[in-house]
Amino acid sequence: MSFTPLGDALRHKMNQSSSLGKQVESAEVVAAAESVLTEVFGSDVGQTAKPLFIKNRTLTVSCGSSAVAQEIRLNQAKIVEKINDKLGKSEVDRIRYLA
């Protein structure tokens, strides 16, 4: 009898239940976005800008002020590129801001 590695079994199970897989991918995108925002702007902006969720390849970010939203907008291409690089695949196309 052969054994299947636990990681392979979990990946297979997540692929079968697509809603769980999508939730995990969404959480990975949000975590990568938090990391990139802190990396690009430092901990000050990283604390006032909070990635909330991703839907239809659009990342929604809550911003503490309109100035923070403007800074993110001006650096959107760089931020999107860094998030996708960190994930190893293209998951985010644009950023939506809530100020």
Image (tube, rainbow, N blue to C red):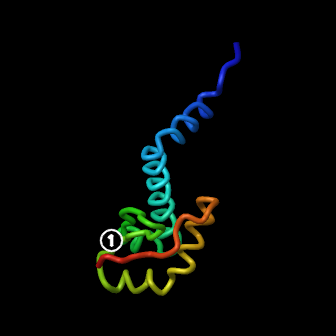
Of residue 47 and residue 72, the one placed in the foreground of this image is 72
Of residue 28 and residue 49, the one placed in the foreground of this image is 28
- Quadrant position of residue 66: bottom left
Residue 71 horizontal/vertical position (percent)? 43, 84
Number of marks present in the image shown: 1
Q: Residue furthest right?
A: 2
The N terminus is located in which quarter? top right
The C terminus is located in which quarter? bottom left
Using the image, determine if residue 74 lies above or below residue 48: below
94 vs 87, left or right, is left
* Residue shown at the point (41%, 64%) measured from the top left: 55
Residue 21 horizontal/vertical position (percent)? 48, 46
Of residue 75 and residue 24, the one placed in the foreground of this image is 24
Residue 12 horizontal/vertical position (percent)? 58, 36
Query: How many residues crowd around disc 1 within 10 Å: few (fewer than 14), some, or many (20 or more)?
Result: some
* Residue shown at the point (51%, 60%) measured from the top left: 32
51 vs 3, left or right, is left
| Secondary structure of the residue carrying numbered label 1 | strand
Using the image, determine if residue 19 lies above or below residue 86: above
Residue 4 horizontal/vertical position (percent)? 65, 25
Using the image, determine if residue 66 lies above or below residue 39: below
Which residue type does callout 1 highlight?
Ser
- Quadrant position of residue 58: bottom left
Q: Which residue is mark 1?
A: 62
* Residue shown at the point (37%, 81%) measured from the top left: 68
* Residue shown at the point (47%, 70%) measured from the top left: 37
52 vs 74, left or right, is left
